[in-house]
Amino acid sequence: MHLSILKAFNPDVLVEMLETAHYFEKWDKLLYTADILYSYAQRIYEERLYYKAMGTTIPLIKMQHPLVYYFGFSQQMRGVAYQHLGDYEQARDSIYRYVELGWLEDLGPDGQEIAREFRCLAKMNLYAVEILSGKVELLHDYACFLQTYPNGLLDGLVVIMQTALSFGLNVDEQLSHLNDDVSEIKLEQDKTAQSKYRRFCYLVDLYNMRKD
């Protein structure tokens, strides 16, 4: 996509579009929009490097987050889409693109913190992809990791239940480790969190019916 067209986009509007597509599980739209956001971030970054090399003032662009956030979020959403579509190889590829964002120049303290957050998120999502693709021996380690990363708990619980149903596993032990955290989720008011929680409860019902 031409730079002049890309620069006409508002990256924060693209983020909102990605969040909406994610919520309504519009995976094709999620992929399309994620690619646009990534291309936008890449072009803006290249432009900044050019101005820096020329020794001229870098134009300011109104964005709610440091540029590194848009690199990471676009690839995170791309990975989420491919994971839900069952294309785990492409999901892994997306995760590897945001597992280490420290290569970006001039991150600053805020950018470095965002890069660390994406590194942790990538670890969680790589666990999920590996488990869903059949490496069920990682389930215990995954449950332990979720205890240290509450922001990923809901997504993790869904992954555990999907894995249990797909491979006919008993995951009572893993769920027992997360019982206290699950109880706290019931108090969440965020609509996305509530939607994920309902999905988890639905999968638990299927799991219990299978055991009966």
Image (cartoon, rainbow, N blue to C red):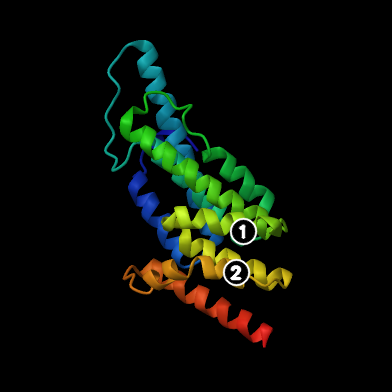
Q: Residues within 10 Å of mark 2 (few under 14, many from 20)?
A: few
State the image coordinates of residue 155 (x, y, percent, origin top left). Answer: 50, 62
Question: Does residue 73 sit above or below 60 in this rendering?
Answer: below
Q: Nearer the viewer, residue 200 or 68?
A: 200
Q: Are marks 1 and 2 in contact (CB under 8 Å)?
A: yes
Q: Is residue 81 left or right of residue 16?
A: right
Q: Circle 2 — which element?
A: helix
Going from N to C along the chain, the mark reached first, 1 or 2, is 1
Give the quarter of the figure containing the C terminus.
bottom right
Q: CA distance from mark 1 to mark 2?
A: 8 Å
Q: Residues within 10 Å of mark 1 (few under 14, many from 20)?
A: some
What residue sits right under mark 2 in the picture?
173
State the image coordinates of residue 144 (x, y, percent, origin top left). Answer: 54, 56
Task: Judge whether residue 15 can be spotted in this image.
Answer: yes
Question: Does residue 29 sit above or below 210 in this rendering?
Answer: above
State the image coordinates of residue 42 (x, y, percent, origin top left). Answer: 46, 33
- Amino acid under label 2? Glu
Task: Judge whether residue 6 can be spotted in this image.
Answer: no
What is the number of the mark on residue 140? Answer: 1
- Amino acid under label 1? His
Question: Does residue 4 sit above or below 159 in this rendering?
Answer: above
Residue at horizontal 46 percent and vertical 29 percent from the top = 102
Residue at horizontal 46 percent and vertical 43 percent from the top = 118
Q: Is residue 58 left or right of residue 76?
A: left
Residue at horizontal 51 percent and vertical 74 percent from the top = 199
What is the number of the mark on residue 162? Answer: none
Question: Does residue 65 sit above or below 129 in this rendering?
Answer: above
Residue at horizontal 58 percent and vertical 64 percent from the top = 159
Q: Is residue 95 left or right of residue 39?
A: right
